[in-house]
Image: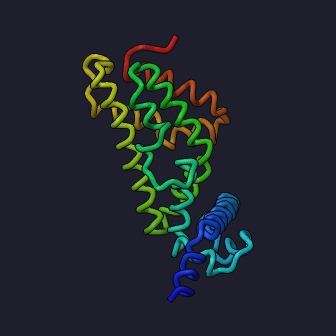
Amino acid sequence: MVKEHASRRAYNSPRRQQQAAATRRTILEAAERLFLQDGYPATTMEAIAAEAGVSLKTAYLPFSTKSGLLRALWDLRLKSDDADAPVVQHEWFREVLEEPDPVRKLQLNARNSAAAKTRIGGLFRVIRGAAETDADCGALWRLIQSDFYANQQMIVESIHRGGGLRRGLSVAAGTDILWTLNHPDAWMLLAGQRGWSPHAYEAWLAQASCAQLLGTPIT
């Protein structure tokens, strides 16, 4: 019995957990390279395992399916860490909600948007393309849209509570506007097709958000 408990403690040791986390990150990074290079349909789990230098079983173990791996990769790049907490619990998002000045609030939101889209910009194309042929990826794309809308709504509601929304603008309309300005499509058009830098995108988003939601252009 003592040997059994000792073995169980060794199996669940922090070092083993760290090794598992490192292997998981290696698999995710390998998958990202291949997804961006070859696209989602053409990238097999066998290719991902080979790229990561692990067995096929090891590649499948943390994610179960290729679509599960893509979802985990999206989550990692969106949050920039391995934490399981949703976006609304991350410090960089809480900072936006807790900022009392509406102009500064939208500037911080633009900063976060540019940083996140720089990390995940390439995955937009991968996920959207995969959503057309894969049901699980389609569900992921719809989840991204709904979560993103809900997060923008929280920001608009916080501006409304502080009396910052421009006269005549409802929370619903304000959310639609901020969601549209901050949508992945805008990033893919400006940065992806027109070559805008993250800094230029951030400045534009801050200016446009303040003008549309507050009626106050940044000077």
Indicate left or right for 205 with 29 as reference: left
Q: Is residue 134 above or below residue 1?
A: above
Q: Position of residue 184 (x, y in %)?
A: 51, 43
Q: Position of residue 57 (x, y in %)?
A: 62, 81
Q: Which residue does the image show at 69% across and 60% down from the upper left? A: 33
Residue furthest front as drawn: 2
Is residue 42 among what the camera can see?
no
Q: Is residue 65 above or below residue 143?
A: below
* Nearest the eye: 98 or 60: 98
Indicate left or right for 44 with 156 as reference: right
* Nearest the eye: 41 or 45: 45
Q: Is residue 194 above or below residue 14?
A: above
* Nearest the eye: 194 or 159: 159
Residue 10, quarter of picture: bottom right
- The mark tally for this picture is 0
Q: Which residue does the image show at 67% across and 71% down from the upper left? A: 48
Q: Which residue does the image show at 57% across and 24% down from the upper left? A: 203
Indicate left or right for 125 with 96 as reference: right
Q: Position of residue 191 (x, y in %)?
A: 62, 38
Q: Which residue does the image show at 38% across and 16% down from the upper left? A: 215
Q: Position of residue 74 (x, y in %)?
A: 54, 56
* Nearest the eye: 124 or 14: 14
Indicate left or right for 150 with 144 as reference: left
Residue furthest bottom as drawn: 1
Is residue 167 among what the camera can see?
yes
Q: How is the image coloured?
A: rainbow
